[in-house]
Image: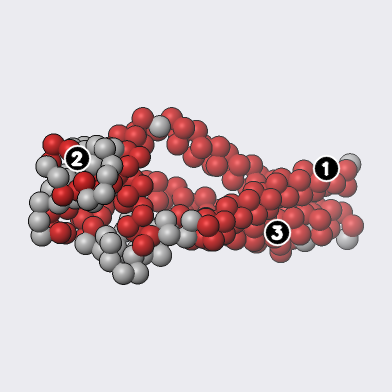
């Protein structure tokens, strides 16, 4: 009976971790594709220039693949060390995510202020050599969200030392339209506009976060259940 339970949990955990590993492959693939084809789209942060979408996806995908591989191997080999390693790694990730979420909600105001200051510093790198990614990122955001600057279109005046904004701020795009009168530019601040957009899509973000947490809890349950079953089977055989 114990052996039958072990076999059932074994194949369930293997299937779970195989899907986990395939998910990691998918995330890694998207990250590599972004880096290869959309490499010019980078971070908006001047303090963390390597914190691009592509790099985050590549790191996340590789880490998920590694955890999934350990879980698959531990399940198929019925190895206690690998199962325990998988459990601890997944638990570490879960606790890290929970800590980040709590800190984010506790220090929301401070994070808001720091983010706006950092983004304003980043504006000074717009259009400069070696910052094509940041330049394209700002152009895309201002065009898609119909906004200009971090907190106001006047943020760009300090960058250019003139009454001027990038052409992506224009209501109707044309060459050098950023030199025209302010009445031809978007007035909405990009930081608040993106923040409102995220709040409007908070339900989708919440569902994604909840699903991620449930998958991780399921993985922890499978790992610990199988670990206990392997320990029981070893004790029974002995």
Disc 3: which residue:
69
Horizontally, residue 141 falls left or right of residue 3, namely: left
The residues tagged by marks 2 and 3 sit, at their Cα atoms, a distance apart of 51 Å
Horizontally, residue 30 falls left or right of residue 142, namely: right
Q: Position of residue 147 (x, y in %)?
A: 25, 40
Could you tell which of marks 2 and 1 lies nearer the N-terminus?
A: 1
Disc 2: which residue:
185
Q: Residues within 10 Å of mark 2 (few under 14, many from 20)?
A: many
Can residue 228 be seen in the rendering of this structure? no
Horizontally, residue 160 falls left or right of residue 132, namely: left
Q: Residue at the location (36% across, 36% down)?
A: 198
The residues tagged by marks 1 and 3 sit, at their Cα atoms, a distance apart of 19 Å
Disc 1: which residue:
8
Residue, far bottom: 129
> Foreground: 156 or 89?
156
Taking 207 as reference, is 143 above or below it? Answer: below
The residues tagged by marks 2 and 1 sit, at their Cα atoms, a distance apart of 63 Å
Q: Position of residue 12 (x, y in %)?
A: 77, 43
* Quadrant location of the N terminus in the rendered image: top right
Badge 2 marks a residue whose secondary structure is loop
> Foreground: 174 or 32?
174
């Amino acid at each position: 009976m114990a052996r039958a339970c072990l076999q059932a949990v074994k194949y369930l955990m293997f299937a779970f971790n195989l899907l986990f590993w395939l998910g990691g492959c998918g995330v890694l693939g998207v990250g590599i594709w972004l880096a290869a084809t959309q490499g010019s789209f980078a971070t908006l942060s001047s303090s963390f220039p390597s914190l691009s979408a592509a790099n985050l996806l590549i790191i996340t995908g590789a880490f998920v693949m590694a955890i999934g591989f350990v879980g698959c191997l531990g399940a198929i080999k019925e190895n206690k060390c690998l199962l325990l390693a998988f459990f601890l790694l997944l638990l570490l990730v879960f606790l890290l995510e929970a800590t980040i979420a709590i800190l984010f909600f506790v220090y929301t105001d401070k994070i808001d202020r720091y983010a706006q200051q950092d983004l304003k510093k980043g504006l000074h790198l717009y259009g400069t050599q070696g910052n094509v990614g940041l330049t394209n990122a700002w152009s895309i955001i201002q065009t898609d969200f119909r906004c200009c600057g971090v907190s106001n279109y006047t943020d760009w005046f300090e960058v250019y030392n003139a009454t001027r904004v990038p052409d992506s701020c224009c209501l109707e795009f044309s060459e050098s339209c950023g030199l025209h009168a302010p009445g031809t530019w978007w007035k909405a601040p990009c930081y608040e506009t993106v923040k409102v957009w995220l709040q409007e899509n908070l339900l989708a973000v919440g569902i994604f976060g909840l699903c991620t947490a449930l998958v991780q809890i399921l993985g922890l349950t499978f790992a610990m259940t199988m670990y206990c079953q392997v320990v029981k089977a070893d004790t029974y055989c002995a």
